[in-house]
Amino acid sequence: MSTTTNTNTNTNTTTATTATRGQGQSIDLAGKIGLIDGHWQPRVVAEMNDYQFKVVKVLGAFEWHRHAATDETFIVLEGALCIALRGPGYAQGHAIVLTAGQMAVVPRGIEHKPCATVETKLLLIEPRGVVNTGDGDAGGRTVQNDQWI
Ligand code: NI
């Protein structure tokens, strides 16, 4: 796994300042993504209350996973993202395709499998503490949470 310079080491919410939470400043999402090495490596750029904004670039297929306790928002900044969904209320093979400027919310508890056939840049919105692989270590692809860039 690649390493990324972390300029925001203070992520303890009891002591974090608004500046270290990415607040009160302009955040260049493309510039932040440009600092990330590798795919499927989400990095936090800001917080709003208990929610975090994470940027990530993806390519290829991720693992099926679910988040039992929370919904998860995907916003496509560049490229195209497919999200396969399975669970109650979804027909077999159901999938969403998002292009730049489009978004989707994956409901809590619903299994999802993101994939991209071209390198795709995303903004994710989810509560602080959500792990990329959800309730399990899907395929050994869990990334340390709460890494800032
Ligand atoms: Ni997820």
Image (cartoon, helix red, strand yellow):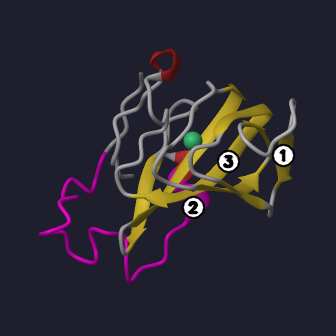
Q: Which of marks 2 and 1 is nearer the N terminus?
A: 2
Location of residue 3 in the rendering, given as x and y in whole percent from the top left corner: 36, 31
Query: Main SS of the magenta segment?
Result: loop
Residue 18 lies in quadrant: bottom left
Cβ–Cβ below 8 Å for labels 2 and 3? Answer: yes
Tag 1: residue type?
A: Ile
Q: Residue furthest bottom?
A: 24
Please report the residue visible at 41 percent of the width from the left and 21 percent of the height from the top: 1
- Report the magenta residues as a range: 6-32
Q: Which of marks 2 and 1 is in front?
A: 1
Question: In the rendered image, which residue does mark 3 sit on?
Answer: 121
Viewer-closest of 53 and 89: 89
Q: Circle 1 — which element?
A: strand
Please report the residue visible at 39 percent of the width from the left and 52 percent of the height from the top: 149
Tag 3: residue type?
A: Lys
- Label 1 Cα neighbours within 10 Å, binned few <14 / some 14-19 / many ≥20: few
Q: Disc number at residue 96? A: 1
Residue 72 on the magenta segment: no
Question: In the rendered image, which residue does mark 2 sit on?
Answer: 29
Q: Nearer the viewer, mark 1 or mark 3?
A: 1
